[in-house]
Amino acid sequence: MESVNEITDSRAATNALLADLREARFAPPAVARFLTHAAHRSLRQAALRPEALAQLTALHGLMLAAATGRRPGRRWVATSWALAALHLGLLEHRTRLTAADALTLIRASLPAVPGGGSRWSGMPAIALDVADGRIARRTGTASPFGDYADTFADAAFWMWLIWRHEPSRTIRAAALAAWALPVVTLTALAMRRGTMPERPRPAVLRPAAAMQAVVAFRHLTRRRHPSVAPRRLPARRAPACPPRVRPARTPHGP
């Protein structure tokens, strides 16, 4: 465990950390040791890739400016930056981000930028998803960083869109099964086996792709109900004043 930072392969380093955690039966000291070593390695790997870190920061800086005054806005973008920076070691032998990586990170932050929650937002999300995969394959720049970023970008955007805008409970449950369940399952398998599981095959991801089309179409064609004007309460009348009682005139004497 002392030499985990010297392991150049990110998968092998993660497997070493997970194996130690499993052998210790997830005891609190082992969990603390796991988090400490993982954080230290992540920071060290980011420092070894200053160009990628600078690209990542510049990209999120632009999205941070666009997210000002929006919800979830800046916190969403800041979280995306932190998660990506801590996983730069998954770039393996590369020292910079590619166009495919940038498109994936932009898709992950769509909820925070203008238009991210519009009725058209599902279309650019699907387009970016298709584009980053094709660019990575054509240029031979696929990496574990891009693979895992792609999975989490899908889960983040589509789960946010559904819980924010989808009224159907059935669609929400299906979305949970399509996106959140695979992420939870992969994490649970990694903890149980003490090794990182292989990324799901494309056939396993087809239900999620089908859900993307369904959710995007429903969001695009959903009728926007006009806002109902608040009922006007009748004007309150001022309480009637009691009639003034004039004092009786006393008869004057002669």
Image: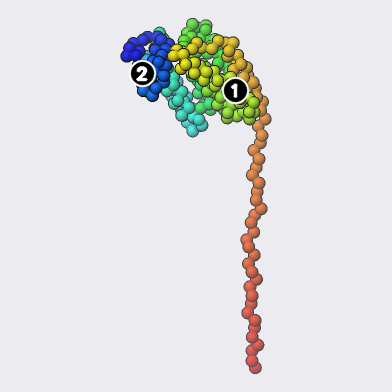
Which residue is at a point 36% across and 10% down the rendered structure image? 7
Horizontal and vertical percent for residue 176? Answer: 58, 23
Is any atom of residue 99 visible in this view? no
Quarter of the image where one finds residue 38: top left
Which residue is at a point 55% across and 16% down the rendered structure image? 129
Disc 2 marks which amino acid? His
As helix, strand or loop, the secondary structure at mark 1 comes to: helix
Name the residue carrying label 2: 37
Number of residues whose C-alpha sits closer than 10 Å to that of mark 2, classed few (under 14), some (14–19) or many (20 or more): some
Disc 1 marks which amino acid? Ala
226 displayed left or right of 189: right
As helix, strand or loop, the secondary structure at mark 2 comes to: helix
For the N terminus, the quadrant is top left
Horizontal and vertical percent for residue 204? Answer: 58, 12
- Label 1 with label 2: CB-CB less than 8 Å: no
Q: Nearer the viewer, mark 1 or mark 2?
A: 2
Say how the picture is coloured: rainbow
Which residue is at a point 46% across and 10% down the rendered structure image? 143
CA gap, disc 1 to disc 2? 34 Å
Is any atom of residue 203 visible in this view? yes
Quarter of the image where one finds residue 45: top left
Name the residue carrying label 1: 175
